[in-house]
Amino acid sequence: METKLLSQFVGDPQQHSIERAIEHGAYQAWQKVLKEIAPADLIQIVKDSGLRGRGGAGFPTGMKWGFVPKETLKPKYLCCNADESEPGTCKDRVLLEGDPHAVVEGMMIASYAIDCHTAFFYIRGEYDVGQVRMSKAIDDAYAKGFLGKNILGSGYDLDIVVHRGGGAYICGEETALLSSLEGDKGLARLKPPFPAVEGLYNCPTIINNVETLANLPHIVMKGAQWFAGLGTEKSKGTRIFSVSGHVKNPGNYELELGYSLRDLVYGLAGGILDDKPLKAIIPGGSSTPLLLPDKIDTKLDFESVAAAGSMLGSGAVIVIHEETCIVWVAEILAHFYMHESCGKCTPCRQGTGWMYEILRRIEAGHGKMEDIDTLLDIADNIEGNTICPLGDAAAVPVISTVKLFRDEYVYHIEHGKCKVRSQFRLRVK
Amino acid sequence: MSDFNITVNGQQVPVTKGQTVLQASLAAGIDIPVFCWHAQLVPVGACRICLVEIEKLPKLQVACATIASEGMIVHTDSPKTIKARQGVLEFILAHHPLDCPTCDKGGECDLQNLTFKYGLDYSRQHEPKHRVIVDANSTFDDLLIGPEIIRNQNRCIHCYRCTRIVDEIAFEDDLGAYQRGYHTEILPPPGREIRNLYSGNVVEYCPVGALTNDDWRYKVRVWLTKQTNVICPHCPDGCNLKLWTFHNKLFRATSNANENIDNGFLCDIGRYGYRYVASADRIKRPMVRRAGELVETGWEEALTFIKKQTDDIKSKLSGSGFFGFIGDIRTNEEIYAFQRLLRRVIGSNNIDHRFHRRRRLTPGEEVISRGIESDNAEYKDIENADVIIVLGSDLHSENPITSLRVKRAVKRHNAKVILLNPLPTPLGKRTATVEVIYKQGTAAVLLHSLIDAMVDLNQFDASAVKLSAADIADFRKANAAYSGVKGSEITGVDVSLVARVAEMLAAAQNVFILAGSYIERDPLRDSLHLAVANLQSFCKSARKIFLPPDSNSVGAAFLGAEPTVLPGRQSWAKKAVCEDLWHGPISDAPGKDTIGILEAIDEDEIECGFVFNADPVRLFPDGEYVRSVMEKLKLLVVIDSFMTDTARFADVILPLSTFAEIEGTRVNWEKRMQYSQRAIPPLHESKPGCQIIELLADRLGVRFNQPNPADVYQEMAKFLPTGAPTIYAGIGKDGFLIRSVAANKPGKLADLRFVAPAIDTEYRFFLLVGNADHHRGALTERNETLMKFTSEPFVGISEADATDLAVSDGDLVKVESKYGRVVGKAMILRDFPSRRVLLPENFGEMSTNVLMGRQDKIDLVRLAKM
Amino acid sequence: MILSDSAKLQISQTATRYPKVRSAILPALHVAYEEHGYLSDQMYEEIAQVLGVKFIEVAEAASFYTMFPKAKRGKYLIQVCRNISCALLGSHHLTTYLLDKLNVGLGEITADGLFTVVEAECLGSCTTAPMMQVNAHYYENLTVEKVDRLIEEFRSQK
């Protein structure tokens, strides 16, 4: 069932070495690009492939590149967003640790397409192995002449700088990432101007996700038509899904877009832990609305998940079984958004904390019935009114859990305790 | 002027391209609430209170940062907008303490006002309010974060106006936002205070009571106060202040924003400057010297005393035995009336307002014939310049708000700023593109080297320069000794640095030259003015301003406070106009300037002086001499608010009201005349200047019947350029620009006449006199608030010299010259060049002029540890 | 001087890789943290001097991110992921288990100076939950037995 396009070699413990990666075809696409493909053609190829961003929003990659102004004297920058922090998501890490050269090559190709000569690899500070392997991969690529000045005699120069984050989820948001990369606090910025026009150091900047970039060598080698043949009509290629939570075989699985949630959860991931009934699934990372078991046959592509009432997001599928208190789930997520709010704009700074405090109170058994509507209204006052999507993301779990499990909230408030047991203990063995 | 319209709430609103929805709406009188937005700051869209609905856009948009585009249909009061606005207010109030009754901001708090207007009247917030506890034993969470500023983090709504003002406007770094999310806390950097020269602005623009001022705190409620609009008397920038009074007491000063000038920002000297008014040191009653002692007396007795003494002297020496000095901080009306008193009533043209300089008070013929004076230029011209030269000026301390314009030019369009100074100045690193330090007294050579380097580059625009190739060649030949390596040896400035500056100037399209006190006080001032004019000839669209020393120096020069020029800078030929207006003859005896007056006293030709709010004993660059001369006077009448160094020599002292107690007009460096209201009645038994002058004139024989400034103004206005308002009511917010007709006559280049300062092996240090932090001039030493910033004089020396002399910070150091000595605590200045000493001139206990000789071109001293 | 010469050299070299030196603040903070295990105002000052940036820029940035604490920690900083995927598999129990086992409060240092336990938000190890990060390393698919063994190992290594 899996289509191992990006993850084909991640199981090979030596794939992170440049020799092994080259044996497996690394940097062929890069050489092909340098020799044969003009930047404008490259952008067209990626547009034709239908590749969409793998970071969460699913924006068409080629179109994003196309926004970079052509007639400018300013330098252009590419940033690879490896600040993977969306709860439930660990698919980029698989690539960074398992096949770093694919990511480096993707960065090269994207840089070339947008005429960038200094690219930044922004990795979340906690990813130690990933950072070490990517740094090594980049150093080795320099040694082989794939990076640096006049690469392979093409006349094209490219440097890649590895930049470690300092521990802040918000830096996965592209404008906050730029603030952070400039040495500032990770504060989100107003858009417009969009980074493609005015980003890093006020210069045109493209920010692409790790997985997005890792697709590029394949598209270059096998062509846009081939890539467009994978997946569904509007969702092309594969995705690496991180399946976590209450499943028998949690893990990262690469699937062509269009398989169903059932295929993933009950097939590859082996079904629900201890064969308990399924309660809900968060299909695209913590910022996406929950789906009830009746949506288990939803196809995993951007449009189908949206039609089911959620989002494909970062591809993080979090499975929750019946014995889980949903208020407790909401509290954990609310704590996260409160902790990660950058503090720049009012609704997010104040609203995330307020929602958490109410949820904590309900969970602790001191809820009031009006809290439920207050929660919904706070979420409504945050949603759409903040500078960056963190506010919207924080509102989602609250709105979604209240909408789908209002009875549990009511029970919690009326009885001062969870409707279902939610004490998960550490396994002994 | 508008480019297109947008629709706001159904109303057509004109928009100038580039305007935001907020700007266009506010201009059209449509109210959109704001917290984080400020007209002078880059919008950040943080507070979200200005969210509005724009048709066709799915989400609400912040009006403050959304550029208006043609056809936009905006709703600022739709249900969706109102809900969002209420939501934002609710969020802000969730943890905002409800301590309005004990909060200083109450009554003028944006949050309070907007809550009344838009907020809900109940709270859904049941959780305990967050507190940032400063002292566990106190229920107040106040933290003193600088000499004058108190922070209450609980009230902070995180609009970041304060940190943005410090960063974007002031280019300072003593306030930041730390941590993240709800925990974001406003603080100075660890181990430091907020004490930059513009720190008070963060309080004024804090929309809530998170930042408050010590001077205003808990003293009076804002709604009880009355406000008057005055012009700041502390420097020639001419900022507009609002004075807040209650029961005729001053409680604070804030900005009365004027976009021509201050853009709504004040320096701390201007903001807290008013505090000297209520100083306990004020002279409260007239004083007369009896048996060698100054004793208090009544007005009548004092005037009688003056009448008797002056009659005696007048019968002996006629009018030429008298002189008058008037301080540059007085109003035009007082200056005008004072010189009229001298010329018409006393019969003397010996009058001056310039005490800082040792020679060439009246410009030489060449300077006059070439029309070398400040050009007609305004603040906005600084902002529009692409290269700004700050020459011989500690602009930051002397003209703080002009400095802000320079910074704005840097912030808005990356203007290049070139500092040419004898010492490093606080405008320093972040503002300056290049900072050039020349040896004291060599500025003219430096300017010449620059011109020469520009010619070498051959990049200047010959047609714009309006000089023939032959002119230029002649000029270079004549001044070859001051160019290139030779020039560099004199100035101590590296040839490559000169070349770099020359390149910047050659590439500039629009140059602004600000020449300051180090040029104005230089013994070779005329040469320097010529050199500045030479440089100007080589720069495209260049304007120059010779910054005047005090708040109304321009007015004083214009209204007759100089011996040979009548009001309106009329020549002597026009004296009939004056005689006509003043009901009688004026003397034809040529007046003497400060130096001439002092010499005449020394030679017993002058025996009586009227010194009106001036302190030559403190300022004239030869302390010993000026003291010896003052002692010789038979009668010295001092009209002042304080016991100045000069007043100690007085035979009669008449108590004078300060700027807050009088109305009148002042002229700033732009030559902009502005009207200043009276905030409080005269304190103690002091009287406003015009009234004192009327009393004196009346007593001495001529009655003008003009005891009020408004009356004086009506007469004085006849000397103002055509179009000037004839009564106070005609002076609007923009004031009136007294443009110069003489300025900017093109001409040949002037040759440099440079005399190298003599080097003395014993007195190895150049003496530099400047301002201490948060001080300017002598008024600030009587200001409790400003004394919190720097409370005593110091001896500023370089790190290298400190090591050499084995001196540490705070050690007592003796500074000696051929003429005298002072002692002070050493202050080691980072990045300060060696062989220089910096002394502040703001403190009575350290009179820097005792170290100076009036014959010297340069002041040299030696240093020793005590 | 707190930062070693080699650390300063590393910081100044890193700075050359960026178009603007301010960008090197985060890398510099990492260098300082790796050398000392905590940060201080003095280190901010030294970083500011090496880079030629303002002290306040370093101080503000450092305070924003979680990886540059000013408090000293135990030799082994144990960060237990508290987020959803780990929580569903018992991470809260993992935290209390560790605190009980090490007899220490959250954020405190054990008497022997070896351990500090804190909770962290999602560390990107969701498919191998529950997990904890000890200094730079991830320990995944944790069980009581595995945690016991790890603590013993750390103790024996001292």
Image: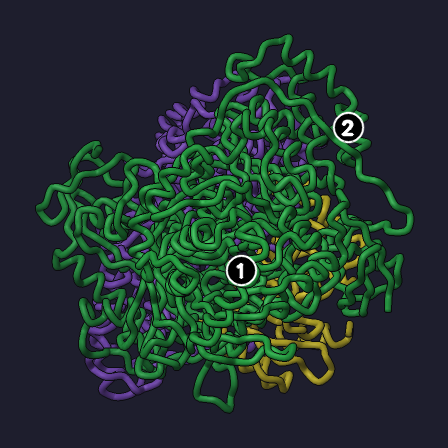
Chain colours: A purple, B green, C yellow
Callout 2 and callout 1 share a chain: yes
Above or below, B278 relative to B48: below
What residue is shown at x 80% (from left), y 35% (from top)? B756
Element type where label 1 sits in the image: strand
Residue B578, by quadrant, is top left
Specify the farthest residue to the right. Answer: B761
- Residue B389 versus residue C51: which sits nearer the camera? B389
Element type where label 2 sits in the image: helix
In the displayed structure image, the side of residue B26 where residue B670 appears, left or right: right
What residue is shown at x 53% (from left), y 22% (from top)? A33
Q: Kindly tell me whether residue C149 is visible in this rendering.
A: yes
Q: Which residue in the protein does label 1 denote?
A: B610
Mark 1 neighbour density, 10 Å: few (under 14) some (14–19) many (20 or more): many
Three-letter code, disc 2: Gly
Q: Along the polypeptide, which appears first: circle 2 or circle 1? A: 2
Mark in the foreground, 2 or 1? 1
The quarter in which the C terminus of chain B is drawn is bottom right
Q: Chain letter of disc 2?
A: B
- At which x and y percent is residue B775? 58, 62
Q: Which residue in the protein does label 2 denote?
A: B487
